[in-house]
Image: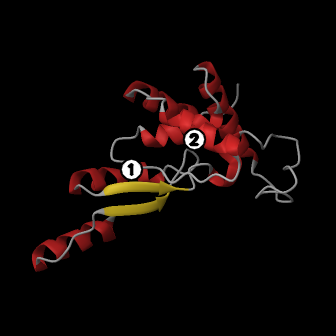
Amino acid sequence: AEQLAEADRVAREQGTVRFTVLQNHYNLLRLEDDEEVLPLCRELGIAYIPYFPLASGLLTGKYRRGEPAPEGTRLAGREIDDEQLERVEALTRFAEERGHTLHELAVAALACTPGIASVIAGATKPEQVRANAAAASWRLSQDELDALRAATFRTGP
């Protein structure tokens, strides 16, 4: 955030082109930009566009505690951190309580976050395209977004 603020200050002083878009690695398991970067982008009028909204597939629901990652997936053969899986389980409960999938939640929550202009959500299968489209129709309220942030960091049942 500090570098972005400095770059904006210098551009204003020199009368040069300012940043209009910032693309960062951001998802429901990686919310560090909530503290400084997103508020600064809103303040400066910079569109924020997150990539990796599905956290390499962790936020699709296909990875589960105690089960090996499915063959052919990005995380196949890799160890998945228990803390992340606990957070994924909390997010899954949050989505299911509202009649949605984890994948839909992962994309919709970002799309509904103030300051986020768009979400880079790729797809390699038709069902992923459908999940992305379903996410686009889910409008989370600010209260839901706040509850979601709390659920993301809460662990246990």
Task: Identify which residue is drawn at 27% across, 68% down.
Answer: 19
Q: Is mark 1 on a helix, strand or loop?
A: loop
Quarter residue 95 falls in: top right
- 98 and 147: which one is in front? 98
Task: Identify which residue is drawn at 30% across, 55% down.
Answer: 41
- 33 and 54: which one is in front? 54
Disc 1 residue type (three-letter): Glu
- 74 and 146: which one is in front? 74
Q: Is residue 72 above or below residue 93?
A: below
Label 1 Cα crowd, 10 Å radius (few <14 / some 14-19 / many 20+): few
Dot 2 or dot 1: first in sequence order is 1
Quarter residue 132 falls in: top right
- Give the image location of residue 113, x and y in percent: 40, 40
Find disc 2 in the rendering and name its residue: 132
| Relative horizontal placement of residue 75, taking residue 129 as reference (left or right) | right
Task: Identify which residue is drawn at 57% across, 20% down.
Answer: 98
Find disc 1 in the rendering and name its residue: 35
- Give the image location of residue 120, x and y in percent: 51, 54
- Give the image location of residue 133, x and y in percent: 55, 38
Closest to the camera, between mark 2 and mark 1, is: 2
In three-dimensional space, the C-alpha distance between marks 2 and 1, rounded to whole angstroms, equals 26 Å
Disc 2 residue type (three-letter): Asn
- Give the image location of residue 49, x and y in percent: 42, 55
Q: For the image shown, how many numbered marks are present on the structure?
A: 2
Q: In this view, does 18 lie above or below 66?
A: below
- 58 and 153: which one is in front? 58
Task: Identify which residue is drawn at 70% across, 38% down.
Answer: 86
Quadrant placement of the N terminus: bottom left
Q: Can residue 36 be seen in this view?
A: no
